[in-house]
Amino acid sequence: MENWQDNQLHQLMSEKEEQAIFNAVFNLAMQIGFTYASFRITTLLGSHQTNSTDFNNYPNEWNRCYQRNNYQTVDPLVFHCHRSVFPILWSPEVFQSTPTLWRDMQEHGLRQGCSQSVHDVRGIVSTLSLARNSVPITTDEFYSKAGQVLWLCNWLHSALADKLLPTPRLDNSYPLSPREAEIMKWTAEGKTASEIADILHLTTRTVGFHMSTIMRKFGVNNKASAVLCAAKSGLLF
């Protein structure tokens, strides 16, 4: 990869301690022209965040400002990255609905930046953001470095998702029956109730009944959330 030497990548992939990994990431970010880097890994259930861990080398005062103002609840970067795997280039237009957040970012030296996310079937989302104080990020630079940013985000997700956010096991007081587990797996494959009925030689009404029971056991009100719960409990692996 351009500007990343083989020995630097080898050092990153050989590190075991979290802080050492992120020190290597911060160094790689500098190699491609960024002063700051942030890696956030979050567990989502439906659209709700249930757990989060963040490593960054942002200015301490900015981190305190972000927490003090509870900016995470209105941050358009968080909103975008929790819903899309397309990279996003920071701009006034992105922060149009949150001008105070954008102003505070500028005042703390986070003037130019981009973010990239990775999602997995368990509902775990990793977001890598790179930023600097000056020199606008051109469209050419944004796209030319997108592959490096995506590779780095994917590698961090693969290396750290299980370590930083271990998959919780669901309460087994109400385990799924073999039939319910079978229906859940086909649902996770994207099959409709009608298709599952054909595969399992059931009626569509019976499949719907089982799905209602599954959602009640998981305490959710839609199939997407049920799939996430099943994935996080290990039922889909």
Image (cartoon, rainbow, N blue to C red):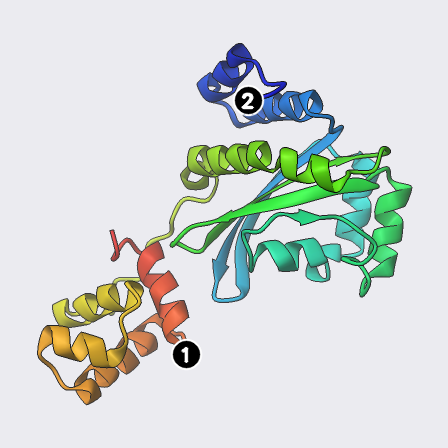
- The three-letter code of the residue at mark 1 reads Asn
Asked if residue 211 lies left or right of residue 89, the reply is left
Q: Nearer the viewer, residue 232 or 193?
A: 193
User: What count of labels does the image hold?
Assistant: 2
Residue bearing mark 1: 221
**Vertical arrangement, residue 230 with respect to residue 12, above or below:** below
**Vertical arrangement, residue 77 with respect to residue 178, above or below:** above
Q: Give percent across and percent down for residue 11.
A: 51, 14
**Vertical arrangement, residue 191 with respect to residue 143, above or below:** below
Q: Quadrant of residue 148?
A: top right
Residue at the outermost top position:
7
Q: Nearer the viewer, residue 209 or 136?
A: 136
Asked if residue 128 lies left or right of residue 112, the reply is left
Earlier-in-chain disc, 2 versus 1: 2
How far is disc 2 from disc 1 in space, using C-alphas? 45 Å
Residue at the outermost front position:
140
Q: Quadrant of residue 180?
A: bottom left
> Residue at point 53% right, 53% down?
51
Residue at the outermost left position:
201
Q: Give percent across and percent down for residue 201.
A: 8, 79
The label on residue 234 is: none
Q: Give percent across and percent down for residue 6.
A: 51, 13
Mark 2 or 1: in front is: 2
Asked whether the viewer can see residue 173, the reply is no
Residue bearing mark 2: 1
